[in-house]
Image: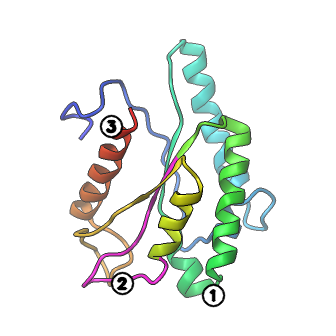
Amino acid sequence: LVEAGKLNSPTYLVKIGTSGSYITQWLPGSSRGLWEGWIPLVDKAVALMKTMGKPFRVIVWQSIGLNDRYSQGTSAANFTSMMATFRADFRARFGAGVRFLGTDFNNPPTQTYDWTTVFSQMAATDPLYYSISVKGATYVDAGVHYDYAGFKIIANNMVNTMVAFG
């Protein structure tokens, strides 16, 4: 996607992920400390871009919610509220204009996720949040972790969204 020239500028990636996590664990001060573990990585990347004098913008690709819904029993309202807190905390640190692209997890017939509307509602209330379709994505297991081909579909959808907002 980047190699195909869809993005007209260099793209740098700070990849962070923790399988089995849920949104409360990504908030500042959580007992698991995920915020405190990964924010320094983003801080370093931002500092490097500034030191190099490179123009940049931070865009977050996010895939979270399955564990909240199925393992934690988080309500849709609490999930939405915690996601808003996460975005606000992140934007307070890295800029009010940071955009978030979040997977909606709705991929019938492999998986039908009853929270799909949660992601579209977040997009409707936050103009810098985009709900990204995962339709057609394939998995390495029972509809939880995407395989290479599945990630390519999702990444294409995210890049196309980034291209659309310029």
Which disc is residue 112 wearing?
2
Please give the range of residues in magenta: 100-115
Along the line of sight, which residue is nearer the eye, 14 or 159? 159
Q: Amino acid at mark 1?
A: Gly
Say which residue label 3 marks: 163
Badge 2 vs badge 1, beta-carbon distance below 8 Å: no
**N-term mark: 3 or 1:** 1
* Residue drawn 63% across the image and 25% down it: 47
**N-term mark: 2 or 1:** 1
Q: Which residue is the extreme one toward the front?
A: 124
Residues packed near mark 2 inside 10 Å, few (<14), some (14 to 19) or many (20 plus): few
Residues packed near mark 1 inside 10 Å, few (<14), some (14 to 19) or many (20 plus): few
Q: Amino acid at mark 3?
A: Val
In magenta segment, residue 105: yes
**N-term mark: 3 or 2:** 2
Question: Which callout, 3 or 1, points to the residue nearer the camera?
Answer: 3
Give the image location of residue 67, x and y in percent: 55, 78
Whole-angstrom CA distance, mark 3 to mark 1, is 35 Å
Which disc is residue 73 wearing?
1
80 above or below 125?
Answer: below
